[in-house]
Amino acid sequence: MLRLATRADIPRICEIRDSVRDDRFSDPAVVTEAELARFIDTGALWVWQEPEGTVAGFVAGDARDGSLWALFVARGYEGKGIGRALLKAGCDTLRAAGHRTATLSTDPGTRAERHYRADGWSVIGRNAKGELVFQKPL
């Protein structure tokens, strides 16, 4: 089930973020609970919750600049369509905020790169960290 995140979800969101295999944050400490709370308070952070209550993934769209700030699926939940559902929710959030194009970045050679390419995202360059920068019309 897709739903807006609450502050009670923050510990699980951090757990998922810190446990992914690829496309890891170089410094997870820069993503503070306060930053997560800001996304939650603006209705821009969605989670996928399994029927038994486990949060299996999350996405955050940044309405300030039209970017997808984060999209992560917990280990053991990959390949079940959760990432696609979260990606759609993140893009819908950006569209509702008035953006006509979404951007995101990810490390090259990752499953995330393949996921975005398969969803129709186009590489428009690289950022200062060497990540691929993707763009997609909304």
Image: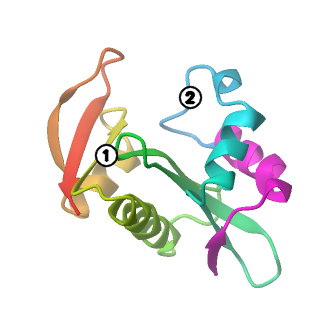
Q: Badge 2: few (under 14), some or many (20 or more) residues near its Cα, within 10 Å?
A: few
Q: What residue is shown with label 2?
A: 25
Please state the horizontal and vertical placement of residue 98, each as a whole percent of the image.
31, 59
The span shown in magenta is: 1-18
Q: Which disc, if any, is residue 138? A: none
**In which quadrant of the rendered image does the N terminus lie?**
bottom right
User: In the displayed image of the protein, which residue is found farthest to the front?
Assistant: 98
Q: Residue at x 60, y 60 (%)?
A: 43
Residue at the (64%, 55%) spot, across then down: 75
Q: Residue at x 62, y 20 (%)?
A: 27
SS at mark 2? loop
Residue at which label 1 appears: 113
- Furthest toward the bottom, the residue is 51
Among the two numbered marks 2 and 1 on one chain, the one whose residue lies closer to the N terminus? 2
Identity, as a three-letter code, of the amino acid under mark 2: Phe
Q: Height in image: 18 above or below 28?
A: below
Q: Is residue 10 above or below residue 3?
A: above
Q: Is residue 138 magenta?
A: no
Quarter of the picture containing the C terminus is bottom left
Would you say the magenta stretch is mainly helix, strand or loop? helix
Q: Residues within 10 Å of mark 1 (few under 14, many from 20)?
A: many
Dividing the picture into quarters, in which one does residue 74 lie? bottom right
Q: Amino acid at mark 1?
A: Glu
Of residue 36 and residue 129, the one placed in the foreground of this image is 36
Tell whether 69 sits left or right of 52: left
Q: Secondary structure at mark 1?
A: helix
Q: Whole-percent x and y of residue 20?
A: 61, 43
Residue at horizontal 21 percent and vertical 47 percent from the top? 135
